[in-house]
Amino acid sequence: MVLVLIITISIILRLALAGKYADSWDTVDFALGLSNFDLLSMQPHFPGYPIYMFFGILIYPLIGDQIETLSLISAVSGGLLILPVFYLSTNLFGKSTGWMAAILTAVHPLIWLLAEVPMSDMMGILFIYLYLWLISISLKIPLADKDHEKILFAGAALYALAMGIRISYFPYVFMLLIPLLRSIMDNHKPWVSFWRGLLITGITGAVFVSLWFVPLALHEGGIIPFLQLGLRFTEGHFTQWGGTILTSGDWVERLYKFLVQLGFKGWFGIITDQPIAKFILLAIFILGLVITFIKWKNRRQRENNTWAYFFLFLSVIPYFIWIMVGQNVDKIRHIVILSPVFMILLAKFIAILRDIPQKIWLAIFAVFFFVQGLSLSYEYRTTIPPMVQLADYLNQRYVKQNMLIFTWEEERVIDFYFPEIKTEKVQSVSYFKQTVLNYGKQEELLVTNSVLNGFKEQGYDLYPLFNEVAVFQGNSLLYPNYNQIVLYEAKPELYQWLNMK
């Protein structure tokens, strides 16, 4: 009853503060896909997120608004996430830890925030944690028991469905090692059990993946065209826009960003930009954790949680490697899936304490998280995203027929709200030059700072050829890549420069 109440209150709060704007390229992709599903038009982009889109397309006619539909799915998923976190942490460390992990997950600011965002992340996280909960049941079953194979079957099925929501969570396939290894340990025929388990996992996974893969591929013209589209998109993700190791810095820089994003924001929930506040809060938390660790060290001989910690290891390390290699470490949403795991660990540390100290530390974290989560979600609900500010400004201040704007990802949001505005997505100076000359001289030719920054990285500083017109700002945590958009208007000298090149 108490758990149902926590989940209900969480869903109500998330619905009340759910996002109402298409504030990014990906959001627009999902929104357009609700009314016209077409991967070639990036509605949504590859791989199509078919199960997520299925739920969206199913309820969209009832809601009538694309963004509200997507936000509803995120809000409900965010509230329901508390359920698998509670049972997962209970299976790992006991009911006391389970209750504290559920409370901390319910109020954690970034988990809460992601439940307001009209994207596929929160539904994907919900399915992954349902999958982790299922796998954790294997820890309660004796070694070599036949029930481990049932867990393998159900786990492979649920994992395959989760891949139809967010395929970027694929590293969690390694969690199937838990029931597989436990099924062969103390088994008088370990290799027979091992190959049988692999066969069960492989066949089940293939069957359940085909439930969404085959219809999706056929919808896009067949399996071969679909795979070709996937190869093109994957190449672009790794070499152009994905923020992977190939496009955004070295290993040390990426590791630093990961630790800052996860340590300060994903785990501790510290979202302030003030260095002193960060230092003080972090010092308090570390002091508490050190004291708790000492107590845990003194008691660890009484506990045998090797499998539980191995479970948590597998739920973090493979995905961490994927983040470092193939994800954008600037986007906190790519890392939030790890936050519930750390809430479980935090709850475990607190649970080692007794009576009043335990309640005090739980209250400190819960209140700290809740205040920040409420503030951050309220800001997300009530402020206009920079991309939408830009679109509104263009619509109000310029005559559409005489204006052309060059952007990068801002184009998608501008076209979503005001398709009559002439926009061009540009990355290279050569394309920019050719496009401007093809259009002819415009009364107003505009660019954003993302375009000019890109040109500067290519060795062309075009800033002197433009005048700054307006600046649109937002919270860097809410909008990591486009929290400040600067609009520029071309000077007459631009055309002289273009004709000389």
Image (tube, rainbow, N blue to C red):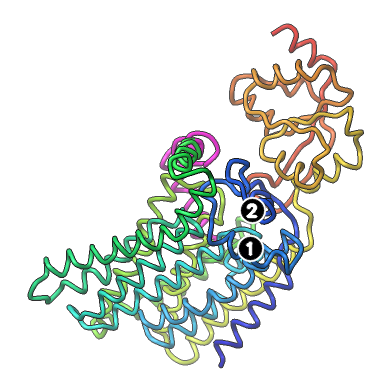
**Spot occupied by residue 303 in the image (x, y as percentages of width and height):** 26, 83
Q: Secondary structure at mark 2?
A: helix
Given residues 405 and 421, the one toward you in this image is 421
Q: Secondary structure at mark 1?
A: helix
**Residue 487 versus residue 284 in the image, above or below:** above
Mark identifier at residue 223: none
Given residues 18 and 475, the one toward you in this image is 18
Residue 114: image quadrant is bottom right
Q: Mark 1 or mark 2, which has the lower sequence index?
A: 2
Q: Amino acid at mark 2?
A: Phe
Q: Residue at x 67, y 51 (%)?
A: 36
> Are the residues tagged 1 and 2 within 8 Å (C-beta)?
yes
Question: Bounds of the magenta span?
Answer: 236-265
**Spot occupied by residue 274 in the image (x, y as percentages of width and height):** 64, 56
Residue 231 magenta: no
- Outermost residue on the left side: it is 188
Q: Residue at x 62, y 73 (%)?
A: 76
Residue 238 magenta: yes
Q: Amino acid at mark 1?
A: Gly
The span from disc 1 to disc 2 (Cα, nearest Å) is: 9 Å
Residue 494: image quadrant is top right
Mark identifier at residue 30: 2
Going by the image, does 442 lie left or right of 280? right
Q: Main secondary structure of the magenta part?
A: helix
Please rate how many residues cluster around mark 1, counting C-alpha atoms within 10 Å: few if below 14, some from 14 to 19, many from 20.
Answer: many
Please rate how many residues cluster around mark 2, counting C-alpha atoms within 10 Å: few if below 14, some from 14 to 19, many from 20.
Answer: many
Q: Residue at x 21, y 79 (%)?
A: 146
**Spot occupied by residue 455 in the image (x, y as percentages of width and height):** 64, 24
Residue at which label 1 appears = 56
Quarter of the picture holding the N terminus: bottom right
